[in-house]
Amino acid sequence: MIKLFIDENMSPYLAHGLHHLEKGNGSEIEVLSLKEVFGTGAQDEDWIPKVGEMGGIVITQDYNIFRKKQQRELYEKSGVGLFFIKPPSNTGYKYWEMVQQIVNRWPEIKKLIKTNRPFAFSCTTKGKFERLS
């Protein structure tokens, strides 16, 4: 079973919805909310190694995980896969905009999760995922 986490900067309801849709599809993907599993405000340095132990993957808007050397080294060492959904502005996506972004990209995400970890992919509002590492 692949554990795919939705970061706390996205609604846990998005994780619930995707989880139920994948379960109904007989998929091997379990979609979880980082906020619900590790608690609100969990530090990246705390959850990244734990997600790595589970062989997990994370979808996030927090590009600082890649930008900051210490966090980048931590996700690489921990063997985590990351998908960065870069919002069009500093305010981020509104709720339904984020749902639409994830749902529209879901087939591509499902293909890319088979990539050997660690990995990082990033996309902008209208672009495709590009490999960062």
Image (spheres, rainbow, N blue to C red):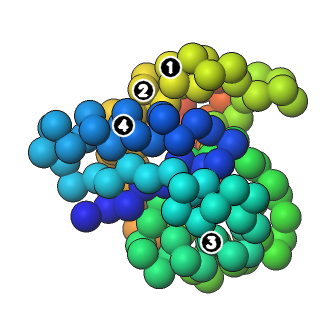
Question: Which of the two labelled residues, at mark 3 and mark 4, occupies the earlier sequence position?
Answer: 4
Which residue in the protein does label 1 denote?
100
- Viewer can see residue 91: yes
Location of the N terminus by quadrant is bottom left
Marks 3 and 4, Cα distance to the nearest angstrom?
Answer: 21 Å
Marks 4 and 1, Cα distance to the nearest angstrom?
Answer: 12 Å
Quadrant of the rendered image containing residue 26: top left
Give yes or no for contact between labels 2 and 3 (Cβ–Cβ under 8 Å): no
Location of the C terminus by quadrant is bottom right
Residue 2's place in the image compared with 59, above or below, is: below
Give yes or no for contact between labels 3 and 4 (Cβ–Cβ under 8 Å): no
Label 3 residue SS: helix
Which mark is on residue 103? Answer: 2
- Mark 1 neighbour density, 10 Å: few (under 14) some (14–19) many (20 or more): few
Give yes or no for contact between labels 1 and 2 (Cβ–Cβ under 8 Å): yes
Question: Which of the two labelled residues, at mark 4 and mark 1, occupies the earlier sequence position?
Answer: 4
Which mark is on residue 48? Answer: 3
Give yes or no for contact between labels 3 and 1 (Cβ–Cβ under 8 Å): no
Q: Is residue 30 rendered to the left or right of residue 85?
A: left
Question: Residue 32 at what x, y percent from top left?
Answer: 44, 53
Label 4 residue SS: helix
